[in-house]
Each structure stands twice: as structure tokens, then as C-alpha cells.
Image: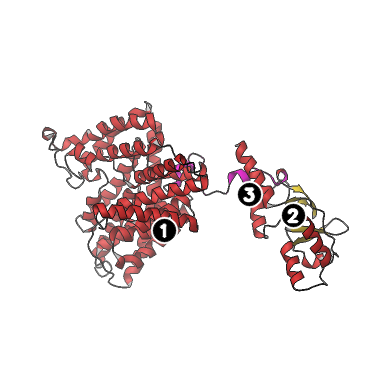
Amino acid sequence: MTATRLFTGHDDYSAAAGAANPHLPGLGRWFVLFMPVVAGFVYGPLVYRFAREARGHGVPEVMYAVAERGGRIRPQVAVVKALASALCIGGGGSVGREGPIVQIGSALGSSLGQLVRLPESRLRILVACGAAGGIAATFNTPIAGVFFALELILADFAVESFAAVVLAAVAASALSRAVFGDHPFLTLPTFTIGSMGEYVAYAVLGLLAAGVGVGWSRALYFIEDLCDRLWRGPEWLRPAAGGLLLGGILLALPQMYGVGYPVLGRAVGGGYAIGFVLLLLVGKIFATSLTIGIGGSGGVFAPSLFVGAMLGEAFGLLLHSADPALAPSPGAFALIGMGAVFAGAARTPITAVLIMFELTGEYRIILPLMLAIALAAGVSKLISRDTIYTRKLLRRGIDLQAPDRALARIPVAAAAGSLPAPLRPGATLTDLAARFAMDGSTALPVVDDTGRLLGVVPALEVERAVQDAAEEVTAADLAHVVPVLTGDESLEDALAELTRHGGAGLPVGSGGVASGWLTHRDLLRAAVGGRQRI
């Protein structure tokens, strides 16, 4: 807000669209043409010189740091991201604050963890704590902050992670409420569900939101690629040069200036006609994509809400004009559209439901909200492999959803040990108990006189037979049929088979004849060695 006031003379220029800057009255509304250029001249060199990862919307960089770098983020990222985002948004960049907040909070958490030399497992959790605290404090959404960090950043709901992230969100939110008060981030009119027929309309909106969410993600990276191809100058100058084009958009459609929450609120309240609402939808997609494409710094969460609100409002107005009973409150469709488009773009349905509930404080829309978000996320998964966050990493060849790439590159033959001395099919329970007690194995192969593998006897089965006093059983009776791994299979596939068959150990060989043996210990030893070579 301070940066916006500095550049425009208004707390939020999107609410004062078309007004003159009181500091530059002679320019009238034309001053907006130059504000992105001035801001770009400042934050462009700042990002280029000190922290290039501060460019863009920030969340993919945090996801990458957690998944691939053990949670390590450079300390200067927090400072550079804060300054660059404030200048970008204050200078007219049509982006949100959530990406910078997540990256700043995560960088602070990572810096603290590195300072006290925490192990990587703890450092990752501290990064997620920083992200959750930032979301919780800024938007007054402690529950959504927790699930944003767990669902998107960590992709882990373990008790240890959950407890730490909850504590961080509670502390940040409590401090924020003590300083700024306890109010919903968005103040919107009250809406109700008039009839069961509306649920069908909300379901259709969810399907539309999936397509818009995926299309919004595609448009973002298409324009970024286009900017990359067209720009031939130094990178530090790119935000200023591209800022002139952004300024032209803001001159024609000043409602795109900055985050745009006042415009969103007015649209939800029914302040615009359907044609202008659709113009705002397209304008936001283009303005945000251009801001990021020219090297701006800001998030895509707020633009996703904006696009979703415009989609829902247009859909609600259209239904209302056709049959008022289907959409007695078009603004309710705007609220549902906000969460549904975000779910379609980011594919985080739990976070989308919770963050919309906490942002608005409106519980009466929870059922249609859940319906539309579930459909949007599900259809988005069907039509697109990536999300608005993971697509940026996939374009660099980084797939965070793929199994461990180190395991995929290592063949079973490189990790397997020698085959333990096999059991004979007729070995008695006494022989089995003595053998397992002697060598401490968790499983042993059973091989007949021809060398053919009959199965594997787990130590647990022998223990149960001893407890049951089943003296008549033999190794052949206790043997479990398991697959024989081939030497050229990857450890990624072997891990799946190990897990599926109890994890005690699997034979390696061909043609039903075992020549080697693979356990979890062998697999881990090879994986660690593979990572060290990488």
C-alpha cells in the first residue's frame, strides 16, 4: 500500500481507476503509462544483481527448494523479494501478494534453520512453517495457511509436519490479529442458496472453472515464452522496457492496476455489467501474464481469485437474465468461481475450500463451494498433467510428482547382494527357527533340488508357526510366491515390488532361477551412492 501511494497518490489505484496522481496533476491519468517503467528501472537491476530467483511468482521456487535442495533458500531472497514485489505491485504490476509472502516467509524459515544447522528433514518443515505463517498472518487465514503449506509446499500430512506448521500459523495469526484486528480479508455481501436447482448450476460452473483455470495457466507461460523470444536486451532492463507495454494496458483498463481487490469486491456486489465483467476477466489474465513475462515479481493466487470471480459473476448474471430463480444472487456464483478457478489452476482442493471460507467468513456457501472445487480439480487433472505452479518447474525438466529420479536411473543388478543360502522345501519348523535365529534374516528363499525358486519364507511366518506349535509345517508350506526381479529393472520398480510383498526381501534372477537378493537396505545404499554421484 505504501508503494502504491508513492507511485499513484492513492491507497489502491484500481479503486480510483482513471483518476489523476495528485503529485503529478499535469499528466492527468496518463501518468500510469510511466509508473511500471519507473518501478522496473528500480527492481529489475535489484533482482538481477542479488537474487534472480525472486523474479516471478515465487511458489515454484519454494517447492523446488523443499523437494530438491533440502529446504535451503538463500537469505537474501527474503529481502530482495519483499522490495521487488512491493515496487512491482506499487508500480502497477497486476500480480498478487501471496507468492512473495510465501517466498519471503519460507526464506526466513530456511535462513533460521541454516543458521542453527538443522538437518534437512527439519529444515524442510521450517520452510513450510514460514510459508504457513506468512499466509496466515497476511490474509488472516490460519487454517488455509496450514493446508497450503502441507498440500502444496511439503506434500506431506505427517503428524510431525502438521504439528509444527499449525504452531507457526497460530503464532503468526495471533500476532497479526493483535496488531491489525480480526476481520475477514474480503468483506462481501451475504448470499444464500435459494433452491436445489442452483447446485446443478454450481456444478456447471465448476466444470467451466476447470477449463478456465488450465487455460489461465497456459496463457501465463505462453506470454512468458513470447517475452523470452522477443526480448534481446539485458535482463535487468527487461522490466522497465516491458513496463511501457504494461502501462498501455493500465491506461486503457486501469482496473488492472496492482492486486485489484476493490474491483473484485465491486464485481461480486453486482457493480458491473456482464460485458465489462468478461473484459476484466480477459484483461486480468493478459495483464498478469505480461507482468510476470517482463520479469515482474508477484503471485498468481490473487489473479486466480480475480479471474474466478469474473467468471462466476458473468455466469451468474447470464443465468439470472435467463431465469432469476436459477441465480437469485449472481454474486454467490462469483464467490464459488473464485475458489473453483484457483482449484483448477493450482489443483489444491483442500486449500481452495478452506481459503475461500476464511477469506469471506461465509459458511452458507460451503456446500456449493465444495462441489464446484471438487469438479474443477478433478477435471483439471484429466485435461492437464501440470498446474500453474508445477508447470514452471516442468519447463526446466524438474518433475516434482515423479518418483525418485535417482532410483529410476539405477538398475537392480547394481544394488542386489548375493543370494542367501536357500532353504530346502522339506526343512522342518525347528530347522527354520534355528536358521532365522542364527543369521538374523527377515526372509529367506526356498529352492528345490533343480534350483527353481518356490517362494520366500518371511521370519514373521516362522514366528507365528512357532507360537501356534505347528510342528508339522515345512518351508514349502510357509513359502510366499513372489516375483523374481530381473537385473535390468530399475530400483524405482523394485521398490514398488518390495513394498507390495512385505518389504523383507526379493530374489533377483531370470527364468524362475534366483541368483541374487535385494532388500531395502541394498536399495537405500545404492540410492545414497547414486545421489552422491549426481
Residue extending farthest front: 116
The answer to whether residue 384 is magenta is no
Name the residue type under label 1: Pro
Which of the two discs, 1 and 2, labels the residue nearer the N terminus?
1
Residue extending farthest top: 233
Q: Which mark is residue 349?
A: 1
Number of residues whose C-alpha sits closer than 10 Å to that of mark 2, classed few (under 14), some (14–19) or many (20 or more): many
Write the residue at 81% across / 63% down: 432
Instruction: Give the SS element for disc 2.
Output: loop
Q: Residue 374 at what x, y percent from top left?
A: 42, 62
Taking 480 as reference, is 302 above or below it?
Answer: above
Name the residue type under label 3: Glu
Q: Which residues are magenta?
A: 389-413
Q: Residue 343 at what x, y percent from top left?
A: 39, 55
Which of the two discs, 3 and 2, labels the residue nearer the N terminus?
2
Write the residue at 75% across / 56% down: 440
Name the residue type under label 2: Val
Is residue 340 visible in the rendered image? The answer is: no
Please give the residue where the numbered disc 3 appears in the rendered image. Answer: 492
Q: Residue 439 at what x, y percent from top left?
A: 78, 55
User: 65 or 271: which is nearer to us?
Assistant: 65
User: 91 or 468: which is nearer to us?
Assistant: 468
How far apart in space, not on screen, are marks 3 and 1 (Cα)?
A: 29 Å
- Residue 44 quadrant: top left
How far apart in space, not on screen, are marks 3 and 2 (Cα)?
A: 15 Å
Taking 482 as reference, is 18 above or below it?
Answer: above
Query: Does the residue at mark 1 contact the one at mark 2 (Cβ under 8 Å)?
Result: no
Please give the residue where the numbered disc 2 appears in the rendered image. Answer: 484
Q: Residue 63 at what x, y percent from top left?
A: 46, 46
